[in-house]
Amino acid sequence: MTETIDILIVDEVLYLQEKLKTILLKEPRLQILGECQNESEALRMTREYQPHMVVMNSDMPSFNAIELIGNLLSIDPDLLIVMVFSTASKYYIKQAMEAGVREYIIKPFTGHQMIRTLINFYDLNEGNTDGSIEKEKIKEEEENKKQDDIESKVISIFGLKGGVGKSTIAVNLAVGLARKTSKRIAIVDLDLQAGDISLMMNLFPRRTITDLSKDMHLLDEEIIEEYMSVHSTGVRVLPAPISPEASEYINSIYIEKIIKVLTKVYDYIIIDTAPSFSDVNLTALDMSHKVIFVTTLDLPSMKNVKAGLQIMDKLDYPKEKIHLVLNRNQRDLGISIRNMEKTSGKKLLAKIPEDYETSIHAINKGEPFILKNPKMPIVKNFMGLVDFFI
Ligand SMILES: Nc1ncnc2c1ncn2[C@@H]1O[C@H](COP(=O)(O)OP(=O)(O)OP(=O)(O)O)[C@@H](O)[C@H]1O
Ligand SMILES: [Mg+2]
């Protein structure tokens, strides 16, 4: 049981290199023979170094990982290949297994889980295990399942049109929940190019999601707190990048990891989004328990709601996951609530009234209107929406 396991890492985006290097410090049985970032290097190093095992990321945009599996196995049919999937890429597991992969792990994983997966796979293959590792794995999976059951709610605020009130709803929902419950609440500002949640809450962030994306290899439940800005109500905010061009460094793999870590710490994670079906947004929507689809009563919004709901239907989102919320509701806009509900095929969960003065004042002062007099129609109405999620 003491042989070392010689490993070659294949990862275009450096995620595994970082992760396995940290793990290696704790587990002397795992030896990294080499690291490579492209197909030809992977084939060359496998021929030259003859590793026992290749640990490979499935998310490698520039080349076909499935094809590489076949090519590696034709060099060494006994090679053990472990594939690392993100939730977004887990649909390829079947394909990878058919290509010859016999073990995999889904991100995010702890160092302990990775070590156990690699050692157990190797030992099982060499026939030198008494099954105790397997039993330990089952026990830990059960533990993890229990932890996943912590009732954390991820709620994305979405809309395909700019300026309909997504950020207003994100901020007031979070602060409203903080006001009415003693739960831990986080907002993630995923409007990566033009996020203004910090501004709307009068926060001056020291760090943003850009800094976090540079430190992804360190990310865990404790570290993430260092990137959150704290509002006076206790709501914590992971702010959007300060400069729009920084958004290009933040990808859906990071977002998935960030949300997963947040669900371990917070009871509610409210995600504000930019108006599009970008990869980043899709990851957030996939991982959300609820989506608030925000609309206003106008023809472009109605068209966008219909198109957006059709896409969500194609993505197999359960109907009850998506709630339509009307913002800036007022009479005689030419389109009735009935029109909107008929076209969308959905009942409106809430109809937040038009109140330009209160809304703009709240934004300019950085004081969410939900903290104002509860008798005001917009506050009273919004509290109904907050109550729905408690
Ligand atoms: N119920 C409301 N009544 C009147 N004005 C509102 C209401 N809700 C939001 N607004 C105003 O609409 C504008 C846009 O709001 P907000 O920034 O929340 O929208 P958004 O959907 O996040 O926009 P973007 O797509 O640009 O991020 C703001 O000026 C805000 O004050
Ligand atoms: Mg916004």
Image: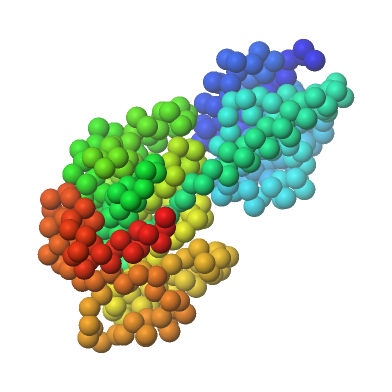
Q: Is residue 10 visible?
A: yes
Q: Is residue 264 left or right of residue 326?
A: right
Q: Is residue 257 visible?
A: no
Residue 341 horizontal/vertical position (percent): 41, 80
Q: Residue at x 51, y 47 (%)?
A: 151
Q: Residue 275 occupies which quadrant of the picture?
A: bottom left
Q: Is residue 106 left or right of residue 50?
A: left
Residue 308 horizontal/vertical position (percent): 44, 70
How many numbered callouts?
0
Q: Is residue 207 above or below residue 149?
A: above
Q: Residue at x 39, y 70 (%)?
A: 349
Residue 98 horizontal/vertical position (percent): 77, 48
Q: How is the image coloured?
A: rainbow
Q: Residue 139 occupies which quadrant of the picture?
A: top right
Q: Residue at x 63, y 48 (%)?
A: 90
Please identify the quadrant where the C terminus is shown.
bottom left
Q: Residue at x 47, y 50 (%)?
A: 153
Q: Is residue 134 left or right of residue 142?
A: right
Please identify the quadrant where the N terminus is shown.
top right
Q: Is residue 83 above or below residue 333?
A: above
